[in-house]
Image (cartoon, rainbow, N blue to C red):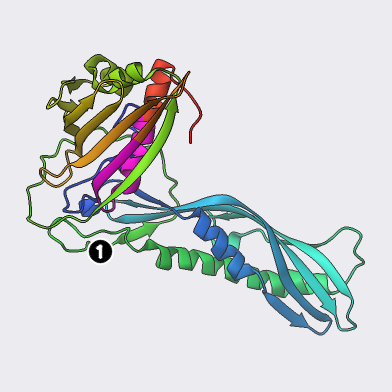
Amino acid sequence: MAKWGEGDPRWIVEERADATNVNNWHWTERDVTGWSTDKLKELLLGLRVEGPEGSCEVTDVPKLDGEASINNRKGKLIYFYEWNVKATWTGTSKTGIKYKGNIDVPNLSDENDMDDLDISVVLCKDEPNTPLTELMRKEGAKKVRAALGSYVGHLKSEFTQGMILPTANGAASKPQPSQTKVKVDKTQIGPSSSAPPSSTGVKISTCKFSLKETFLTSPDELYRTFINQNMVQAFTHAAAVVDGEKGGKFQLLEGSVNGEFTELVPDEKIVMKWRFKTWPCEHYATITLNMKDRGNETELKLECKDVPTGEEDRTKEGWKRYYFEAIKQTFGFGARLY
């Protein structure tokens, strides 16, 4: 597992009042797989061609295997999509006879131009030969290619809102030419060394969330894991300063994460002020950890409030990955995930 703060670039943010990716410097990623599945079905279903022999229509899209995402790096939008599309077409002759066939597009990808797509049109096994197959191969394939091209167009227009963010002075940077030939690598970024942003006097919009996990250990052992400096250094795989007393402060990853313990109830409850170094100056989230003994395991409930709007997902996923999963892997407290 990557060291905490050096793996997932979504945890590294820049100076901005709402704590998002100012100046568009670091990787931000938006998963658009679900949206893409819906959009592809919307564009393909109902496609229809007609000829002297009859008509053909796409009646089902039973398989869409793949993924899609949009990434922003230094103001450049990078689109990644890769799909294996399988559809069903139904032909109706002038005399009313029905025929069924399949469409297969195995290489809808950011690495291929629309003209390079392999679109295979076949008649289902045991179906009698019909001129409608040729109609679908010629005219139907053209409409399928156009629909898939429309999907890419929608991907690059409708779903990029918010990917290019305003810079620190409030001006939105112009997107640089997009790239569609580059796949996202697992770039690792270390702790931010920039100075804390100055307070701008702007009221910060905030949100809250909650999490629940189960650990195969006792409440007292789990409690110590969060307040003992050696144990924190063990699961973060980095130097840390942790004063495990009420009013005690902590710093992780050279100060990239810091805060203060405001309430400690041994083996039951930890309340802390918690922040990223790059959040607005002196702005802290409040995190409450409640531990319940469940026999051979401990249930941990996390309540987090006052997280800057836009930071909910990366804060939540960061706690899951760099606290909960890291603790389980380091100390063998592994248990089922909720």
Q: Is residue 1 visible?
A: no
Q: What residue type is labelled 1?
A: Lys
**Residue 209 position in % (x across, y down):** 33, 46
**Residue 81 position in % (x across, y down):** 51, 53
Q: Is residue 2 left or right of residue 52?
A: left
131 w.r.t. 152: above or below: below
Q: Quadrant of the N terminus?
A: top left
**Residue 146 position in % (x across, y down):** 59, 71
Total of numbered circles in the picture? 1
Quadrant assignment, res 148: bottom right
291 w.r.t. 311: above or below: above
Give the class, few, some or many, for how many residues have Cα within 10 Å of label 1's Cα (few <14, many ≥20).
Answer: few
Q: Is residue 143 magenta?
A: no
Identify which residue, 233 or 305, lies in the foreground.
305
Q: In this figure, which residue is indicated by the disc labeled 1?
A: 174
- Is disc 1 placed on a helix, strand or loop? loop
Quadrant assignment, res 300: top left
The residue at the point 46 percent across, 22 percent down is 334
The residue at the point 72 percent across, 78 percent down is 49
The residue at the point 11 percent across, 46 percent down is 197
What are the residue bounds of the magenta stretch?
A: 302-323
The residue at the point 84 percent across, 60 percent down is 124
**Residue 31 position in % (x across, y down):** 44, 51
177 w.r.t. 49: above or below: above
